[in-house]
Every structure is written in structure tokens, then in C-alpha cells.
Image: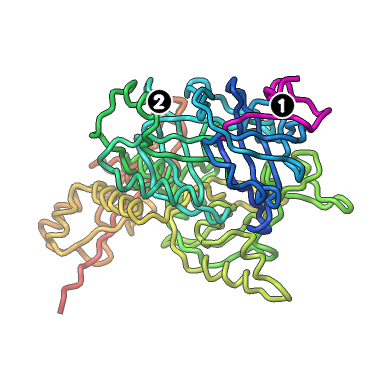
Amino acid sequence: MALWSLFKDLHAGSTTWGLQVRIVRIYKQTYANSSNAGTMEMVLHDETGDRIHASMYLDVYEKFKEHLVEGGLCRITHVMVKDNDWKGKTTANNQRLQLFRLSKVFEFKSDTFPTVMHDLKDFNELIIPKKNAPYQLIDVIGRVTSYLQPTKLHALNKRIMEFKIVDSSGSPLDCCVWDEYIDYLYPVLEHNINKACIVLIKFGRVCDYRGELRFQNTYHVTQIIVNGEDDVFLQFRNRMEIEDGGGCNKLMFSEYEQEIYVLFSQKMAQFRDLKELNAMQNVSNFWAEATIIDIETKTDYWYLSCKNCAKKIYDDGNIKKCWTCNEQSFSFTYRYKIIVSVLDHTGTSTFLLWNREAAAIIGKSAGEMRGLNVDGSKEGDKMVEDALLDKKILFEVRKQTDRNNSNKNYFIVTRIVLNEDILEIYRKNLITDNESTTGVTSEMKKKGLELTVVTSKNKDDKGKGIYLEDEDQYINEKGNADEDKQMALYEENPESDDADGAKSPQTSSESAADVQIKPRRVSDATTDATYMLKKKRIKKEK
């Protein structure tokens, strides 16, 4: 047998192996219950460039840590060979090494031993792994084109920063980093806002994010290097012909908020008040601003859920089981489910808050709140109630019929807006839309009048329809109209095209922005949903 073996020759039947290796990566793997407990992990390559993963306990590492340097060469004798049955693999090798008390490590030097520190993959080669399937960590390099300010996900009690990179062919890749990786990457991007930033992510993971491919770090093996000086950065710059100029774009909203921002800024969102929503049979993707006035949930504000599918976990004898996944669950978490009563100027309604939206409002995860309810204390419940009650929020909702009571209708909250910049766009659009419903707004304000849009029947006090021109002429002739006199009545378009091109009847859910202003007499047989402009006298300052 040769003095020094290659990785391809190793097998579990012996421990007397002798290896010459270069250390590609060395890191400490800690565990959630203790920062002191853990193992030292390494990725090694032999003289052919083949890689293998190696592990050792901390007490073993202490014996020869001075010989283990990332990028350095060493000789290792006496190692155990095991199956590489881990779900997350740092190498493609189906075996891994375990250093133990009889192992020996020595440094050595060589000018001819190869250096294979990177395992770069082309973006177009990446595919979303199958659910629960083993995966291999890989390296990517790209130029940062945009990034978001870090945000905290209260439900997970973690911080996240999203960014986008492109490779030398221009193919994009959505990326994110978590927690301590943000502390390194974000300041570097901020400092180089006007410069090209090339980022190398070593031992990252391809994952599925809502059906889309995303690349992210993995604790604690991932290594991130920005604008390095070794050959891999020089070669990438030469391929892209990158000079010092041309920085990356800092985005002000998260992907979640960015979608809403575009929706509002392009005036594609549909807004309704609660009275209009309650009158509708089917509701999808409508927005309403309302205040939470009560919590209807009478039991816990959270439930025990499967981490895999987020469905409720049930006790099946002495075990906890997820009926959706149809398997015993060893991984579960607490998630919010809170039914609330909301109020606006037109009335009340009932909304259901699921975990993401509830956690965003409350500011803490369901698990954290539940943890405060100890020894009979209801501190967690009280904090939830304090965070929700009297909170005015812009909700996006859809309608849901309760399975146990078909007569009870409530709205499921699908998105909320807490970002003040987005709320400002909403308020500006609301003012613009309200003012655009009449051509006499300016004239009425000159006369000491203002307009408010209200839902009403389409008749005056005597049961007759009225002309817009009649009321306009009345203002011009008389100045200020009588306090109780209606000023104008607009009939909404009785039909509109839905998304499929089919005709569907309008309901009272239509907003002021959807009203067609027509200077014609409104007949007694108009549709139920109409809009009336009712005047108020502007109080003069004393």
C-alpha cells in the first residue's frame, strides 16, 4: 500500500490511513443549546482535487489546532472512515472522515501540491432541490446588482438581508443571508455603494422560496468574501470587463413590500370600505383601512403547527402527528391565528390574522408570547392584546366562509401595510381619487363648501332624481346651498368587464375611483350601488 492514500481508495475497514491534504474550509459547528459544545468541521482535498468532509470533537482539535490552518497543507494519519449520510453535504463524496484520539496531524510544505479552494457553479446549472431531499453545498460568484436593507422576521426571531447577483453571462441569482452574515456583508455593500461589488459565497445552499430558486447561507460553514484579491476574483472581473465604477442599487423595500409599493404607485390596488366589503359575495385582493377594536378569539392566540406544512399538529396518543404530512412530527413551532373585529367610518367587520401578519403587527413570535404565559400568568396574552387593539392598519383581504358555520363570514387577511412610505402613497392616491369624482370640486370650495363621498340611495328627499347641472347652477345662483340639500348624484356604471371578459353586475363594493361621472338624470330604477356627494359648510376660523 502506498504511504499516502487518495480519497477514492478509502474504506471503513481500516483506520491506519495516511493522507496528504489541503484544508479548504475549517469551522466550528455549534449547537442551539450551548455555544461551548460542538465540533470542528473541515473540508479537505487531496492531490487530485477530490474533496472529503472531516470532523473531530473539540478536545481532539485542541491537540493539533496549530497545524490546522485554512488553505494550509497537512498530513493526517489514523482516521475513521464513515458513510456520509448527512442531509446537507459539503462535498459530493459518499464518505466522510472522523479524527479521534489516536489521530495525528503534521504540517508539511510543497510547491507542487495543487490548490483547489473553490467549487464554482454556473447559475444556469442550479435547480431547486426536491422537498426533504439531501443537498450539496456549492460555491457561486457574482456581481451585486441590488440589495435590501436588513429586516427582522419576528416570527422566526431572525434577521434577513436579500440581494441579487449576476454571473459573467448576465444570468441573475436571488440570494439572502441571515443573522451574523449580515453583519459582514451589509456594511461592505454600504461602504462600496458607488463601486462594483463582486461577492464570492462559498458553501451556500440552493433552496425553494415560494416556488422560486434562491441561494442562501448555511450555518456555520458558509463563507462570504467581497472584492477579494485571489485569482477567482481577477478572472471574474476580466470576464465581465468590470472597472471600479458602477455600484449596486439599494432598494428601500423588502420583496413583500416592493410588490405592494408597485401595486399602489401604479394605482392597480382596489380599495373598499367595510360596508362595501360586507355586501360582497366574493372578495379577493381588496384593500381596506380599519382599526382593530376587539379580539374575538376566545382561546389561545396561537396553535402548534408542523414546520413542514404549517398545518395544526394533533396528539395521537403519546406522539404528536401532522395529519397533512401523514407522519409523526418531530419538528414543530407555534403560529398565530387570531380573529379580530375591525371598524371604519361605515361599520364593522371580522378579519382573521394568520401568523405572518399577526407577528408583523405584534413584533414578536407566537412562541415568544406563549413563553410568557408561565405559572398561570397571562402576560403573553396581555402583550398580544396591547399590540393589536386600537391599531389602525391597511389590510388586504379575501372572503372566507367558516366551515363549521356557513352563516358566519369573515375575511382572511392576506397582506398588511405598516411601512409609512407606502401608506403615504395610499393616502395621496385616496385624496386624488376622491377629488377626481367631481368636476365641480374647486368651484364648491370657492363657495365655502367641501365634498365627502358617502354611500346613499339615488334620490333626493322627495324621491326624485336630480341633475348635476341643476345643482351646479343652484350653487352659482344662490351661493351656499341649504344645509340638508343634496348637491349631486352619480350613477355608477351598471356593468363592468371582469378578468375573463365576461359581464358581471356591479355592487356597492365599487370605490369612488370606479364611479363614472355622467351629467344626466338618474332614473328611479338605477342600480342599488350609487354614490352621492353631500356638501358640508367649511367652518371659518375665528
- The overriding secondary structure of the stretch rendered in magenta is loop
Q: Is residue 44 above or below residue 451?
A: above
State which region is magenta.
1-23
Judge from the rendering whether residue 172 lies leftward or rightward of residue 434; answer left or right. right
Q: Residue at x 59, y 42 (%)?
A: 68
In x, y percent, where is residue 349?
53, 58
Judge from the rendering whether residue 167 lies leftward or rightward of residue 138; answer left or right. left
Under circle 1, the secondary element is: loop
Provide the residue designation for mark 1: 94
Under circle 2, the secondary element is: loop
Where residue 62 is drawn, which disc sits there? none
Where residue 167 is drawn, which disc sits there? 2
Q: Is residue 147 magenta?
A: no
In space, the residues marked 1 and 2 are separated at their CA atoms by 30 Å
Quadrant for residue 83, please give it: top right
The amino acid at mark 1 is Asn
Foreground: 489 or 170? 170
The amino acid at mark 2 is Asp
In x, y percent, where is residue 509?
44, 46
Quadrant for residue 521, please give it: top left
Q: Is residue 7 magenta?
A: yes
